[in-house]
DNA sequence: TTAAACCCTCGACTATACTCTATGGCAAGG
DNA sequence: CCTTGCCATAGAGTATAGTCGAGGGTTTAA
């Protein structure tokens, strides 16, 4: 079974433009062409594109994804380097998740404030405090 | 207590350039200027900048952050809109976290593969499959 | 009072990741 | 055979989020 770029675009939720762009960036060296120069995708290609989107979705820059793909093209000799790339990336993901969770808690705190029965009062007070902070320092009130 | 842009940059881990850029984008309408036109930050300003980085770190585009800040400047009358913005954003964060977790599992699966005692064999096999997939479809072998 | 260290704006430049247009070749159905 | 639709490349354009340099005013400390 082989697929045209259009079919792959539908299957992967990537636009045709993006697929061609990725190819231009060296992310799809594994995609063969037919006699007419058309990209001809196989199932194993889809697997690799899936891996690429996995890495992209977790925030890996295309440059690094390219390194990983280069490793894949090189075969088993690059396993150690692939491990290094993915392990480093794994750490980055976890750190990022942690950071986001902390920030989410602060957003939840705000939501709690806005959802309180005396929200108007609290928000007004907050603004009064900010204004006072300006006035006390001889600054114009921007509110 | 007031702070210069340099001090704020140190405190917030944002560059001076970024702070000025944010101001230019309308994210810091609450920052007053002194007689010489210098930005003069108060503690309440730092609080708001903290909120901005919270939203930015969780992936909110500057355009939307600006809407939120505009709400804050408007006072208590915008509470409903702030709630709407933050609630929507909260959903987006959670969806994103879920997606990342799923992708992380796949990366972990790869790492497990590369860490297996017979990793070389498995990776070789994988590549053989991919090659066979090409050959079976009359395509050139890109590996 | 003057030099170093800051601050300002404006506008140009960079990086990343697409997105689209122009131009032209190939392919499948009527 | 020819039109419609899909494929190709090159290169320009867009969006987002900064980053920086030039030119010029301000503050501070020796």
Image (tube, coloured by chain):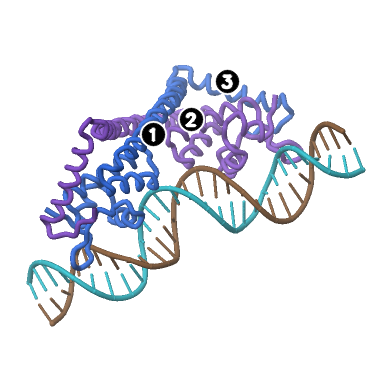
Chain colours: A blue, B purple, C cyan, D brown
Q: Chain of mark 3?
A: A
From the image, tell me which residue sits under label 3: A125
The structure residue drawn at horizontal position 42% and vertical position 36%, both measured from the top left corner, is: B59
Which of discs 1 and 3 lies nearer the camera? The answer is 1
How far apart marks 1 and 3 lie (CA) works out to 46 Å
The residues bearing labels 3 and 2 have C-alpha atoms spaced at a distance of 22 Å
Give the labeled residue for mark 1: A88
User: Does residue B102 appear anywhere in the picture?
Assistant: no
Residue at the far top: name it: A117
Drawn side of residue B70 relative to residue A36, left or right: right
Q: In the image, is residue C21 above or below residue D16?
A: below
Q: Is residue B77 above or below residue A16?
A: above
Contact? badges 1 and 3 (CB < 8 Å): no
Q: Position of residue B108 (x, y in %)?
A: 28, 31
Element under label 1? Answer: helix
Quadrant of residue B88 in the image?
Answer: top left
In this rendering, which labeled residue sits more in front, label 1 or label 2? 1
Spot occupied by residue C7 in the image (x, y as percentages of width and height):
70, 40
- State the residue at coordinates (24%, 46%): A48
Which of the two labelled residues, at mark 1 and mark 3, occupies the earlier sequence position?
Answer: 1
Tell me, yes or no, whether dots 3 and 2 are on the same chain. Answer: no
Instruction: Describe residue B110's horizontal placement relative to residue A108 as left or right.
Output: left
**Residue A43 in picture, x, y percent from top left:** 16, 48
Residue nearest the viewer, comparing B130 with B17: B130
Q: Which residue is more in the foreground, A70 or A35?
A: A70
Query: Disc 2 marks which residue?
Result: B54
- Marks 3 and 2 close (CB-CB < 8 Å): no
Q: Are marks 1 and 2 in contact (CB under 8 Å)?
A: no
């Amino acid at each position: 079974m082989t697929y045209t770029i259009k079919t792959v675009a539908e299957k992967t939720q990537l636009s045709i433009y993006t697929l061609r762009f990725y190819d231009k960036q060296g992310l799809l060296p594994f995609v063969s062409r037919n006699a007419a120069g058309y990209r001809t995708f196989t199932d194993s290609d889809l697997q690799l594109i899936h891996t690429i989107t996995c890495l992209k979705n977790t925030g890996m820059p295309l440059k690094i994804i390219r390194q990983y793909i280069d490793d894949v093209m090189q075969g088993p000799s690059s396993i150690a380097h692939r491990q290094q790339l993915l392990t480093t990336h794994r750490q980055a993901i976890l750190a990022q998740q942690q950071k986001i969770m902390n920030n989410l808690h602060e957003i939840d705190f705000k939501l709690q404030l806005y959802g309180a029965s005396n929200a108007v009062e609290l928000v007004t007070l907050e603004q009064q405090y900010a204004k006072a902070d300006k006035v006390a320092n001889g600054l114009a009130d921007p509110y």
